[in-house]
Image (tube, rainbow, N blue to C red):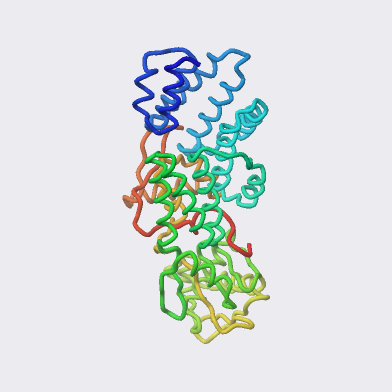
Amino acid sequence: MDALIAAAARALATGDILGALKRVALREDAPALALRGIAMAQLGDFPRAKSLLKSAARAFGPREAVARARCIVAEAEIALVSRDLGWPEASLAAARATLEARGDHVNATHALHLELRRLLLLGRLDEAERQLGAFPTTPLPPALRAAHAMILAGIAMRRLRAGAARASLGQARLAARESGITALAAEVESAATLLDAPAARLITAGTQRVLRIGDVKAVLASDALVVDATRNVVRKAGTTVPLATRPVLFALIRALAQAWPGDVPRDVLLARAFGARHADESHRARLRVEIGRLRAMLRPLAGISATESGFVLKPRRTREVVVLAPPADERHAAVLALLADGEAWSSSALSIALGTSPRTVQRALEELAAAGKAQAFGNGRARRWITPPVPGFPTILLLPGPLPGS
């Protein structure tokens, strides 16, 4: 490695992007192309960055497996930041194995971090925690220590472990300061604000209050019957009834829970579940069928009784029914939760992260765009969606991943 390449690499490692480009901007050899690609990625020009990294990978000779593996890791990071969640996992895993085998433990660890961050975006928390077992025990540079602590904080927040998340973010803050990389320190501070941001609304007996992450965990651990509208499930004392694939049934149970201990008139239930403005006998018959199905699914947790005007929820072995709702009453809250991370998402990546069909996501994006809450740029496969962050919303609770007891 010549002096200019070494100096450019050191500049990139400390966040001095322009300093790195000054040293390699006019060079066309493989190492210079790779460093320019990484620099352009850090500046946000992802198409140019990918092109440069692909050129660098082709330019490295057959004996330069480590250099090619580093280019693949850099491409994977660009894919992650640009929310290309369909990027092949196998390529990154193979590159990490090559780097580990050749003794490049720092870049191998960085590749592992990318795998873990992708798993967090997809909500695969158990798999991410298993992958942490492969984390090396050797000393790491401050930037990698900060990244590792951020991953631990991300898992803890999704598990509603506020104390563990705060401790991990404290470690990340110290490591980021030691690294001297301003952008990394800003990322840590941005993540820390989520711990104190509204995480959900608690609706019970006609009243509402805002909850933080720690409060949500206390609600889920209580003896109350919890209708969780952030995950579309009903919970109580470790028993969970999933209704994410049964939107009509969940609309019914949410309406009943929000009105508890009172009943809900039939016409209100018809409007909530079926959108029926003018109900006829066929709607009322369908309502009876769906209430029967809901009774059967909720039998371990609650009953549903008919009243003169409608239906009322009858919880078993508890005197409290609560609804855990998103912090803002938004129809497409889950899509907005992902868009609010500030990155540009493709509709296909949103579909992968949410586990829903591409067409469902596309319809949601079109409605959000019409309401001025999301905007798109680019065309075809390059089309991406963004939205300005909304203070206090969304929260980590709305991102993919199971909650305790799931």
Residue nearer the viewer, 406 or 102: 102
From this view, report whether residue 151 is shown above or below residue 107.
Answer: below
Query: Does 228 sit left or right of 25 as displayed?
Result: right
Q: Identify the image quadrant of the C terminus.
A: bottom right
Q: Is residue 329 left or right of residue 54?
A: left
**Point 54% across, 45% down: residue:** 148
Residue lying farthest left? 372
Q: Is residue 365 visible?
A: no
**Vertical placement of residue 111 versus 243, above or below:** above
Outermost residue toward the bottom in this view: 308
In the displayed structure, does residue 81 sit left or right of residue 288?
A: left
Q: Compared with residue 333, is residue 149 higher up or lower down, i.e. above or below?
A: above
Give the residue displayed 42% in from the left and 42% down from the top.
Answer: 184
Q: Pick the residue in front: 189 or 246.
A: 189
The residue closer to the viewer here, 8 or 201, is 8
Determine the image quadrant of residue 88.
top right
Q: Position of residue 182 (x, y in %)?
A: 37, 41
* Residue 40 in the image, given as x and y percentages of width and height: 40, 27
Q: Position of residue 309 (x, y in %)?
A: 49, 84
Q: Nearer the viewer, residue 66 or 140?
A: 140
Q: Quadrant of residue 220?
A: bottom right
Residue at the spot 54% in from the left edge and 62% down from the top edge: 160
Image location of residue 382, percent across then percent down: 43, 32
